[in-house]
Image (spheres, rainbow, N blue to C red):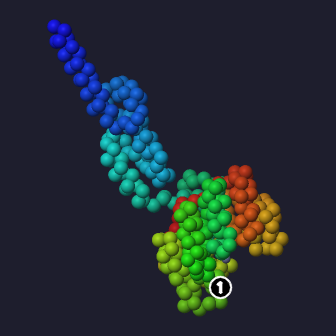
Amino acid sequence: MKKTISLLILIFVLTACGQNQTTSGNTNGDQDKNKVQESTQDNNTSSSNQESEEPKDNEGQTEEASSNEESIEEDNDNETKAEKIEEEKEETSKEPVEPKYELTKNWDLKPIGDAEEKVVLLTIDDAPDKHALDMAKTLKELDAPAIFFVNGHFMDTEEEKNTVKKIHEMGFAIGNHTMDHKNLRNLSKEEQKAQILPLSDLIEEVIGTRPIFFRAPHGANTDYSTQTSLDEDMLVMNWTYGYDWNQEYMTEEAIADIMVNTNLLHNGANLLMHDREWTAKGLDDIVKGLRDKGYSFVRPEEIKTP
Ligand SMILES: [Zn+2]
């Protein structure tokens, strides 16, 4: 009799364990929570169950992956299979970022739809001379995105190429600012072409992708350079304001003050700075000053390109 009772208890315990195993197959550590949830849900694999599991699946993933979380939540088909989530992650990570801003004819950034209005775009020209990498580090620390417009004559050596690669790997966009920084209006069509295309080739060789932004030296576009850039799928971009090439702003304090307190600052302004010592030193204050005024920064990948 004792044996029979023991056997019955054993069978009961085994059955109970078996149930737990089948319902909590997708846990990673936090089993107690799952047990509570599962016992109340009773085989109903609802979307709330899905939600409770998703943050764990996506923990420690990159920004790209966290945007997948949203798409999975929207996709309310109650499938909780890990493989399905993995599949969707791969699919969405290949999709380009939906454009949130478009360039106006005044070179400002205009929100598309309900994108944040109080923004500015940061751009650094004539890179990578002596300060671009430091500037990239400063911006990275402040989590401020930017476009670095590079020149071919600053990419002659392996070291310089490596600097461009590093800046790109830190998450910044690399734009085409021509091979030699000549005024395109003084050049023949062939010469203009030779200023633009070989640099896109060189940038591709260094960072693996062709640039999608073009800025002419001195903002001196020509019909031909504009068309050539468009044919290359590059967005031609001048700027709204900049000061660091004027003698009176060639100190850290002066450039930091004018970039933030100029009356040209407005929603969507496209800010031009250069790879210069005083701008590099003032950059931290510029970014913080703009943030203090309530501005956030446009991410280059959010800009609509041709
Ligand atoms: Zn320039």
Look at the picture and state if 193 lies above or below 160.
below
- Percent across and percent down for residue 301 are 53, 62
- Left or right: residue 69 versus residue 23 is right
- Percent across and percent down for residue 134 are 66, 65
| Furthest-top residue in this view | 1
Residue 225 visible in the snapshot: no
Residue shown at the point (75%, 62%) measured from the top left:
282
Q: Nearer the viewer, residue 154 or 270?
A: 154
Residue 88 visible in the snapshot: yes
Asked where in the image residue 101 lies, by quadrant, the reply is: bottom right
Residue shown at the point (48%, 59%) measured from the top left:
97
Asked where in the image residue 95 lies, by quadrant, the reply is: bottom left
| Furthest-right residue in this view | 248
Name the quarter showing ligand 1: bottom right
- Dot 1 falls on a residue whose secondary structure is loop
The yes-or-no answer for disc 1 within 8 Å of ligand 1 is no
Q: Nearer the viewer, residue 148 or 28?
A: 28
Residue beneath disc 1: 182
Look at the picture and state if 162 lies above or below 27.
below
Q: Amino acid at mark 1?
A: Lys
